[in-house]
Image (cartoon, grey):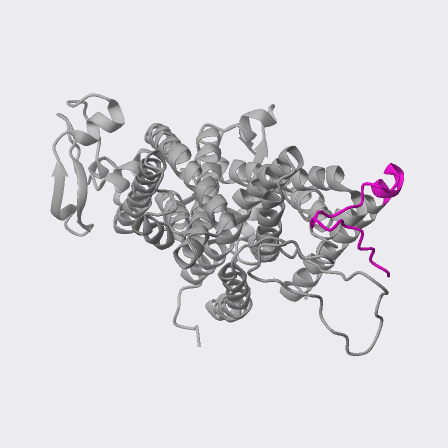
Amino acid sequence: MALKSSGDPSGEPAGDDAPLLHRLAWMAAIWLGSVTALGIIAYVIRAWLNP
Amino acid sequence: MFETFDALLLARIQFAFTVSFHFIFPAFSIGLASYLAVLEGLWLKTGKAIYLDLFRYWIKIFAVAFAMGVVSGIVMSYQFGTNWSVFSDKAGPVIGPLMAYEVLTAFFLEAGFLGVMLFGMSRVGKKLHFAATCMVALGTFVSAFWILSVNSWMQTPVGFEMGANGQFLPGPSWWDIVFNPSFPYRLVHTVIAAYLTTAFVVGGVGAWHLLKDASNGHARKMFSMAMWMAALVAPIQIFAGDMHGLNTLEHQPQKVMAMEGHYQSHPDGAPLILFGIPDSAEKRVKYAIEIPKASSLILKHDLNAPLAGLDTIPDDEEPPVGIIFWSFRIMVGIGFAMLGIGAWSLLARMRRKLYDWHWLHRAALVMAPSGFVAVIAGWITTEVGRQPYVIYNLLRTSDAASPLDAPAVGASLAAFVVVYFAVFSVGTWYILKLMSGPPHTGEAGVKRTEKGPIRTAGITPGPTQNPGGSQPVPGNEGEV
């Protein structure tokens, strides 16, 4: 997946130029991915402790 | 290999080992999450890039510490089932829902928004990103809220009914259980401890870089912010600790007797034993250095107030005095050392020498890990002080363990020791490596991207780096 690099030369990250709905969708997607990742880790540990 | 060991003792060692290891990380991440929220908020409010640089510097460290905290925490909750199944069975109806709330918080607030915090700046924009950072900070606090509520209920159990099968069942009001008598004091004392722990780590790292380069503006800023925390919050923590102690005296008097080393009752005012060697066989503190009547003054606000000693407690209900006596003094000693550093920094600030007094920087560097020692010592005091009970006065620790043989518990303990030292040593080494690099302008974030076409394969040159420079680095702004 292409990662956009749209900051300005002052070093400030950008992203505010995208529509709000677009940004909220990204927020939900990253949030869901993070929760899923932790869920997988928790399940693996559970399986290890109680096979 | 473990046949000659006591299974209960091994289970207790395992819990002590894993919980001590675990708590190091949340003690750091609770404070660091709030610090990151403050830094990002200041960046959005002032527009000064130094706050974004510091945010990017610390978020990498936060990510590693947070990951280790979550993973070691998952192991903790599973351990209730493996080694403490009788406790889980009896207390589950009360503590189960509270722990479930903690897990939900950890998953959906902390871990969920951490992804946005680490990788989402260029996707969600500054304000939504700041909202995610605040959610992570809130999540760490709410997570601590539920865990401390559970622990406090085990220390001061109220609001329950005993079932016919010996289970602790919730009474008519959950609020009585959640806000049990010791909870507010423990919550305040623990959360402030986490903030101070983080402040001294940040201060220590700032001091380290000031000793190498006193002109480093980023090191100056982080050192200054940390010293404000030390100066303002350390006195509050000592006051909160005193209030917590008074609450403990009311609800768990034998814990305070052990903390004070009071084997004997003192009907006419009890001395404050500063140092000595507790001898539980002889029921006295050897070589005691004490201040007459000072303990009564602190605990009862009256020089001549009587204080009961451990001679009023049956021997089989006494907690182990030696451990509690010393862990309490380590915690209090570090608390006053933190107060001293805060006062020293105020003096330096008043004389406009905050960044010039190298002995202050050296002292702050030495104190960098002190918060971790203090919180572990504090938890040893409160957990060992609850013994021989796991639910105070109601369920003995010896009656709460799973019916396992020593080899089973010993094998899992050995596995935990090996895995924890291997995994967490690497993590801690990486955190120290990150801290050893000086904070600078154009600080790189968690993930870096380049301008120009996306390279998808082959050996590619890395992005331009500017580790010690003072100018912004074009192309270094892709992700936080």
Quadrant where the N terminus of chain B sits is bottom left
**Residue B395 shows in the view:** no
Residue A11 lies, with reference to residue B459, above or below; the image says above
Residue B459 appearing in the image: yes
Q: Residue at x 71, y 55 (%)?
A: A38
Q: Quadrant of residue B3?
A: bottom left
How far across and how far down the image is residue B27, in percent?
Answer: 49, 47
Nearest to the observer: residue B289 or residue B164: B289
Residue B261 vs B17, above or below: the answer is above
Q: Position of residue B378 (x, y in %)?
A: 38, 45
Q: Residue at x 53, y 57 (%)?
A: B83
Q: Quadrant of residue B343?
A: top left
Residue B269 relative to residue B135: left or right = left
Residue in front for this viewpoint, B125 or B278: B125
Q: At which x and y percent is residue A33? A: 79, 53
Q: Is residue B130 left or right of residue B27?
A: right
Question: Is B90 a magenta residue?
Answer: no
Main SS of the magenta part reads loop
**In the displayed structure, does residue B83 sit left or right of residue B254?**
right
Region in magenta: A1-25
Numbered label tally: 0
Question: Left of B140 or right of it: where is B450?
Answer: right
Residue toward you, B176 or B335: B335
Give x and y (percent) for residue B116: 73, 48
- Pick the residue in front: B234 or B331: B234
**Quadrant of residue B233 within the rendered picture:** top left
